[in-house]
Image: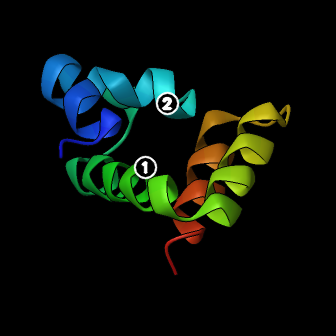
Amino acid sequence: MVSPYDELFSTMGYSAIDLVFGINSYKISEKEKRELIKLAKISESNKAIEQQILMIREQDISEPEKKNKLLSLLY
């Protein structure tokens, strides 16, 4: 079964990062893009991670700070 995120990233490429995380994909490294995609896929089966992502997205913080908080969820 293909996950919704697999379809989204397959169709839109890295620009889907803009939609999923609210981060401009042109301002982050290739490694960070791959890690954010990994985070999106993890969030499909982990509701706690999904909730944390939503909370971070809603915060009024800079994109670099948002990116760092999101990536910290992987570790």
Say the numbered circle drawn on residue 20. Answer: 2
Badge 1 amino acid: Ala
**x, y (%) of residue 68?**
59, 57
**x, y (%) of residue 14?**
25, 29
Q: Is residue 55 above or below residue 24?
A: below
Q: Is residue 16 above or below residue 37?
A: above
Q: Residues within 10 Å of mark 1 (few under 14, many from 20)?
A: many
Badge 2 amino acid: Val
Count of numbered badges drawn on the protein: 2
Proximity of marks 2 and 1: CB atoms separated by less than 8 Å: yes
**x, y (%) of residue 36?**
39, 51
**x, y (%) of residue 12?**
22, 18
State the SS at label 1.
Answer: helix
Q: Label 1: which residue?
A: 40
At a point 19% along the width and 41% down the height, the residue shown is 2
Q: Residues within 10 Å of mark 2 (few under 14, many from 20)?
A: some
Q: What colour scheme has been applied to the protein in the rendered image?
A: rainbow
Say the numbered circle drawn on residue 28. Answer: none
At a point 49% along the width and 72% down the height, the residue shown is 74
Q: Residue furthest front?
A: 1
At a point 81% along the width and 33% down the height, the residue shown is 58
Q: Residue furthest bottom?
A: 75
At a point 33% along the width and 49% down the height, the residue shown is 37
State the SS at label 2.
Answer: helix
The first of marks 2 and 1 along the sequence is 2
